[in-house]
Image (spheres, rainbow, N blue to C red):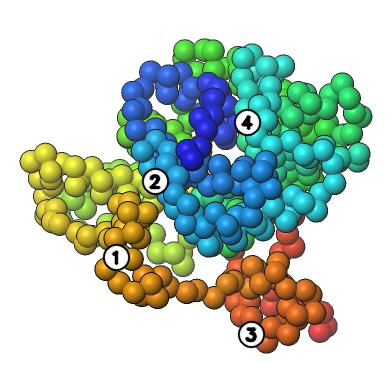
Amino acid sequence: MAPRERAHARIGPSSLARALSCPGSVNFIDNLDDEDGAGPMADEGTILHSFAEDCLNKTLDPFELVGEERTYNGYKYELTEDDAEGIQEGLDIIDDIPGKLLVEKRVDLGRWMPEQFGTCDVGIVGKKRITVFDWKFGFKPVSPVNNPQIMAYALGLWDTFVRDQSDVEQFRLIIHQPRVRGGGGEWDTDLDTLLEFGKKLKRLAKQAADPDAPRIAGDWCDSGYCPGAKDRQCPEYDAFNLSMIVRDFDELDDDMEHDLPLRMTPVGLLTPERRSFLFKHSGMITKYLERIKSEIIDDAIKGRPTPGLKAVDGRSPPRKWSDQDEAEQALRELLPFERVYTKKVITPKKASEILSDKEFDQLADLIDKGERKPVLVPVEDARPALRNIADEFNEED
């Protein structure tokens, strides 16, 4: 079963983080040829969204879908047990929220941005609160706090399905990100805050209509997916990245001329503000370096060598069956039944769903919950900050 195709608006919710910070990117992208699309990770996310959607709409058990392969944009992905566990965690969160369930609904943003819309993963309209739930299957932590994408979903959901039927003005915005330790979270807000955000969307719509709207580079170039950044067609993006990595363009040229190592400020000498700034943009810097690597390899293949480097064959990817069903049949003809299949113990999550609470409690000593590692999130995140040494000394005093 292939995931169904989603319609996309010119300024959709998923691009707002970028468009609000760089209004000129809207027209800039319109004039780019981006045949490759958002890439395999985005296709994988679409496939995982389709599994989650089916589990909600058809009340399916995600663990029963483990091993099923789906294809999107030519990209194939097979649901794993870890994926199923992450989806089940999200389903449990949704099940605990009272209200009318809305799954994969198109929400209208035309009141603020003419002809613009989005598709909300999950909306729950309760008597006292509206909940917007967004699945995220990427590996970069995403917070719901002041997140333009999920705020737009909330605003559109209210305007499309609630505005004329309820006076509920409280909202809870949830991002479920099972692949990232410490990713996602929830944020409580209200209608007034969302309507103020709507004013920003109105201003953006006017700015985006201006062919001379400014282009401003930042971490939104990558987190908001911009083809101009992906293909390095945006000079503002290139200049920003280089300014993040080296202290001065002249120093870089001087280092190259005299074959010196790249000079960067030692981490211990960076101010806390500078460390914070660099960390917030670390994903952007990493992707920029990955693109440089990709371009060097492409140059080598096309006969344009890069000084001091060459491209060689890397490791072969893990082998897998091109057709699972045919391989299974062929193996059963060649091997005894018990040698064709492997057995795997169910996860604690799956066991907790099958066993009674009393039975599951008997397994408590066998479960390793692992150690939570600190993660960095915006200060506005609803989770409490870790206690530090200074806090403990103050309590002792």
Name the residue type under label 3.
Answer: Leu
Q: Quadrant of residue 73?
A: top left
Would residue 263 be seen by someone viewing this image from the given angle?
no
- How far across and how far down the image is residue 380, in percent? 71, 51
In the picture of the structure, the residue carrying the numbered disc 4 is: 119
Between the C-alphas of marks 3 and 4, the distance is 42 Å
Residues 146 and 58: in front is 58
Tag 4 and tag 2, C-beta contact below 8 Å: no
Q: Earlier in the sequence, mark 1 or mark 2?
A: 2
Numbered disc 1: secondary structure:
helix
Give SS at disc 4.
Answer: strand
Residue 226 figure quarter: top left
Hey, which residue is sitting farthest left in the picture?
Answer: 303
Mark 2 lies on residue: 76
Residue for point 53% across, 21% down: 10
Q: Earlier in the sequence, mark 3 or mark 4?
A: 4
Q: Which residue is mark 1?
A: 333
In the depicted view, which residue is nearer to us: 213 or 77?
77
Which element carries disc 2, helix, strand or loop?
strand
**Dot 3 and dot 4 residues touching (CB under 8 Å):** no
- Distance (Cα) linking label 4 and label 2: 23 Å
Closer to the N terminus: mark 1 or mark 4? 4
Q: Mark 3 sits on what residue? A: 366
- Mark whose residue sits in front, 3 or 1: 1
Q: Earlier in the sequence, mark 2 or mark 3?
A: 2
| Residue at 69% from the left image edge and 52% from the top image edge | 91
Amino acid, disc 2:
Lys
Residues under labels 1 and 2: Cα distance?
27 Å
The relative height of residue 394 versus residue 235 in the rendered view (above or below) is below
Relative side of 199 to 82, left or right: right
Comparing marks 3 and 4, which lies closer to the viewer? Answer: 3
Q: Quadrant of residue 389?
A: bottom right
